[in-house]
Amino acid sequence: MKLVSYAANGKHLYGAVVDGGIVDLSARLGPKYPDLKALIAANAFAEAGKAVAGQKADHALGAVTFGPVIPNPDKVICVGLNYKTHREEIGRAPTDNPALFIRFADTQTGHDQPIVLPKASSKLDYEGELAVIIGKGGRHVKARDALSIVAGYSIYNDGSVRDWQNHTPQWAPGKNFPKTGGFGPWMVTADELGDPTQLELTTRLNGQVMQNTTTDLMIFDIPTTIEYITTFTELRAGDVISTGTPGGVGFKRNPPVFMKAGDTCEIEITRIGKLVNKIVAE
């Protein structure tokens, strides 16, 4: 099942993607589960499936405003330098544990919505990533059990304002400008997606391929990352882990390539779909 957060007719809704559009689950299940995070927390996928079965789309995909898949996560935790190609282009030495940083939920934007180039910088870079959405929270989750707490997967563009990211060794400012984190278009449930290591990720800027990898090349795989994170904090339903970007980022190209107003960035992951964002100036 593909689940999506969106707006239509002035209301914030969620639903299931079917041929030709979206079945509105807010109308059918909303009294019990007011948003997609609540549906995930209740593990109500079977109930959602029954509500969708045999239903025609309530909204065409082109007639809605996509939101971030989870607009209101408690945590968005991002993994840095998680592909060898990216670590080497940055010039960083290997580490024994994942490099993590935090994104604020209000920095996110949905599919087909603008990513905003801030007034403070001209160095906005793309980072195509596989996103993991947590279904069942917990602490001290062992790697062998980690995939059992995953609700599904999506696509993240961890838009990075490079000069602000590199003001100091701490990356938070460059990762938290408003509407720089594209997240979408929808979540594919874990049972439908299957093995998350067997995916191809491609980032295109104005149609040109900038990044391409397979997800089996992550340095720290998803189970290892979940075990590490849940050792120091509790993951909760609806939390998001963005698993890192491969080599080919713009600021390490010669000459550097940054996203400009008017550009279009597309990130495609097999068996999930395509996240598309136009770049606009603040």
Image: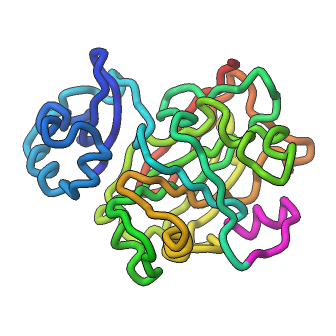
Residue at (69%, 53%) from the top-left corner? 211
Q: Is residue 212 at all visible to an observer of this figure?
A: no
Residue drawn where x is 51% and y is 40% of the image: 105
Of 111 and 178, which appears nearest the observer?
178
The question of residue 92 being in magenta is answered with yes
The residue closer to the viewer here, 96 or 216, is 96
Highlighted range, magenta: 82-95
For residue 85, above or below residue 2:
below
Viewer-closest of 110 and 197: 110
> Residue extending furthest bottom?
144
Residue at the limit of the structure toward the right, as seen here? 255
Task: Please tell me whether residue 188 belongs to the stretch shown in magenta.
Answer: no
Q: Quadrant of the C terminus?
A: top right
Residue at (39% x, 58% y) in the render: 236
Task: Name the quadrant containing residue 147.
Answer: bottom left
Q: Please identify the quarter of the rendering in which residue 15 is found.
A: top left
Left or right: 204, with 161 as reference point: left
Residue found 42% across the figure and 74% down from its top? 146
Residue 231 x %, y %: 52, 73
Residue 269 visible in the snapshot: yes
Give the quarter of the image for residue 200: bottom right
Q: Position of residue 244 (x, y in %)?
A: 63, 59
Q: Position of residue 143 (x, y in %)?
A: 47, 80
In the picture as drawn, the residue positioned furthest to the top comes out as 10
- Vertical arrangement, residue 109 with respect to residue 75, above or below: above
